[in-house]
Image (cartoon, helix red, strand yellow):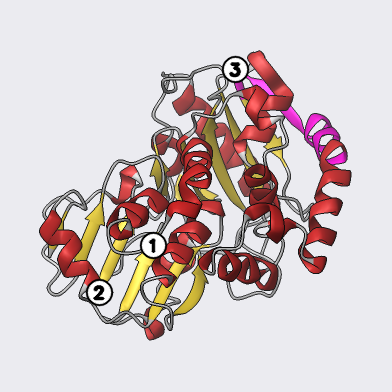
Amino acid sequence: MILGGWSMKGYTDALALDIDKIITDSDLDGVFTAAILKRWWPNAEVIFGHPGSLRAGMMDNVIDRKTAICDLPRHPNCGLSIDHHKSNEPFGENIDDCIILWEPTPSAARIAYNLLKNNVDLSDLTEAMNWVDKLDGGSITIEEFNGDNPILWIGRVIGVNEEITMQILEKIQHRMSIEDILMLPEIKLEFEERVSKQEALKEIIRNNTYVVDRLAIARLENLNIRSNGYLVTSVIGKKCDACMVIHGDTGARFEDDNKYPVSASFYTNSFLHKSGGVFDLTKLATNFDTEGGGHANACGCRIKPIDNNAVTDRDVVSDDIQTNIDEWLKIWSQR
């Protein structure tokens, strides 16, 4: 095991691996991470994963020493782990034959970029990487977020569906500019739809969000809508220090097509708190869900079935959502 991408030996050993699968998150950071790695391992198969399904063992059958896991919790059977989340920081694990490149960088893509920049031409990604860092690291301004930079819009199109996301990843791998990717017919349709629906999405957030003790709570479950913290905090503004976004589908499981379990994401209002939040939000994400986590200022977990203030073994029902929220508010109030 080799800890720390800052180690040149760690980089050298990682580049010597025979990687044939890349499991990555399906967000902007995960897509850029995989696209960069595909320039070194062009024949590797890309598989989109989710922290919950990975930790639940649902991907065990595809992970081996030729697998790179990026922007997601590491797995003891993988050969390469690239990540930057606080909750995934290695603390002396001894995983034989697994190279762990963990750094507290703004994005996982930045680790992949640093890994390959002296071996592969990545000059076309210089500006894009700055935006990936800003967006994933929480350093974007509200003026930038409300602007029209192509990276903002490609990030909003990513995740529409797996086919579109994979197409974007492959075009980045093959050095197509973000502007040209957005003009590809199928992607252009999704891009234009996102533009047209942006104001409607803001209105849905306004109508489904309330603030308690400076924590904005967006109830978007069962609406087939996902939103990141930037959009919620840009809508709510200075009235909140952080937000909680409830999304997903009550009763759904990871294996269900086009649905995912009802979950919560927590984000600091980085427009207001530019150097970090007033509270470590992982305390909320890990209170009930031992597989929850992320960064202190951006993290998430699944809604858990709660009886008598303890996690129980049954399916999640609607009442559990409010029970989880009530407990999180108690923890938040102790900040």
Callout 1 touching callout 2 (CB < 8 Å): no
Could you classify mark 1 by the number of other residues whose Cα lies within 10 Å: few (under 14), some (14-19), or many (20 or more)?
many
Which of the marked residues, 1 or 3, is nearer the chain's N terminus? Answer: 1
Residue 230 placement: quadrant: top right
Callout 2 touching callout 3 (CB < 8 Å): no
Could you classify mark 2 by the number of other residues whose Cα lies within 10 Å: few (under 14), some (14-19), or many (20 or more)?
many
User: Is 195 left, or right, of 218 in this rendering?
Assistant: right
- Residue that label 2 marks: 79
Residue in the image at 44% along x and 59% along y? 33
| Residue 334 placement (x, y as % from top left) | 42, 19
Q: Which mark is residue 165?
A: none
- Residue that label 1 marks: 70
User: Is 256 left, or right, of 99 in this rendering?
Assistant: right
| Residue 166 placement (x, y as % from top left) | 61, 71
Tell me the kind of residue under disc 2: Gly
What is the CA distance from the residue labelled 1 to the residue labelled 2? Answer: 11 Å
What is the CA distance from the residue labelled 2 to the residue labelled 3? Answer: 43 Å
Tag 2's secondary structure? loop
Q: Nearer the viewer, residue 262 or 316?
A: 262
Which of the marked residues, 1 or 2, is nearer the chain's N terminus? Answer: 1
Which of the marked residues, 2 or 3, is nearer the chain's N terminus? Answer: 2
Q: Nearer the viewer, residue 147 or 281?
A: 147
Residue 183 placement: quadrant: bottom right
| Residue 74 placement (x, y as % from top left) | 31, 63
User: Magenta part of the protein: which range?
Assistant: 200-215
